[in-house]
């Protein structure tokens, strides 16, 4: 019946493909990043300010802004966590887009504010922020590729 054809790729509900596994891994990285940063900033803002690498490069400390950022970051962790658990397109694309809406401008902020950073801090900031900013876009791209493959496969079955 399906002789000579590859197995059915995962449906957009996220079951069973290699692309879905890559999407889940990327979502797990983003989820853990946002969960740790958000929790630390929300509940221990002064510790975050003084101990998270390079944060003190942009003083002064503000408890209000730190906790607001922590809460917003935890909110991103929630939607990323939902997409991680159920990697359906309807969850993954909005979660990755919301993350990217934060991460891309955050990257550009740091790239343009390296004046007080040591060379090592500048490399760390640029690299770490570039990786997570790109990861959000990679999740979107992988999801669109997975969905296109599923649509092509479904179309071939109906032809």
Image: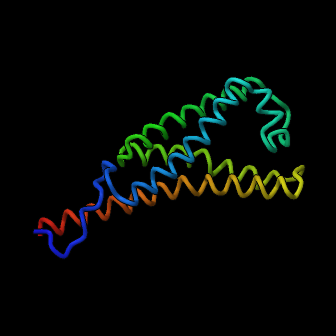
Q: Locate residue 25, reporting x and y percent.
A: 50, 51
Q: Is residue 124 left or right of residue 83?
A: right
* Residue found farthest to the bottom: 4
Is 99 displayed left or right of 147 in the figure? Answer: right
Q: Residue at position x 42%, y 55% from top? A: 21
Vertical order, 129 against 8 (above or below): above
Where is the C terminus found, in terms of image quarters? Answer: bottom left
Q: Residue 130 appears at what percent x and percent y?
A: 66, 57
| 4 lies left or right of 74 | left
Residue 49 placement (x, y as % from top left):
80, 33
Residue under the image location 30 percent in, 56 percent down: 10
Give the answer, above or below, for where 156 lies relative to 40.
Answer: below
Query: Count the marks: how many?
Result: 0
Name the foreground residue: 106 vs 80.
Answer: 80
The colour style of the image is rainbow
In this orientation, which residue lies closer to the viewer: 64 or 42? 42
User: Which residue is rendered at x = 79% and y = 58% of the image?
Assistant: 123
Along the line of sight, which residue is nearer the eye, 92 or 24?
24
Relative horizontal placement of residue 103, taking residue 15 as reference (left or right): right
Residue 136 lies, in percent from the top left, at: 54, 52
Residue found 89% across the figure and 54% down from its top: 118
Q: Is residue 35 above or below residue 146?
A: above
Q: Quadrant of the N terminus?
A: bottom left
Name the foreground residue: 92 vs 31. 31
């Amino acid at each position: 019946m399906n002789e000579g054809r590859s197995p059915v790729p995962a449906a957009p509900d996220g079951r069973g493909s290699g692309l879905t596994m890559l999407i889940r891994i990327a979502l797990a990285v983003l989820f853990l990043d946002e969960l740790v940063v958000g929790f630390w900033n929300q509940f221990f803002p002064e510790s975050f300010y003084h101990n998270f690498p390079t944060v003190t490069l942009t003083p002064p400390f503000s408890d209000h802004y730190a906790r607001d950022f922590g809460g917003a970051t935890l909110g991103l962790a929630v939607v990323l966590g939902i997409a991680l658990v159920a990697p359906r397109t309807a969850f993954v694309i909005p979660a990755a887009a919301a993350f990217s809406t934060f991460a891309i401008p955050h990257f550009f902020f740091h790239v343009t504010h390296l004046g007080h950073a040591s060379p090592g801090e500048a490399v760390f900031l640029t690299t770490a922020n570039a990786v997570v900013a790109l990861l959000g876009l990679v999740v979107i791209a992988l999801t669109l590729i997975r969905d296109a493959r599923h649509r092509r496969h479904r179309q071939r079955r109906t032809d």
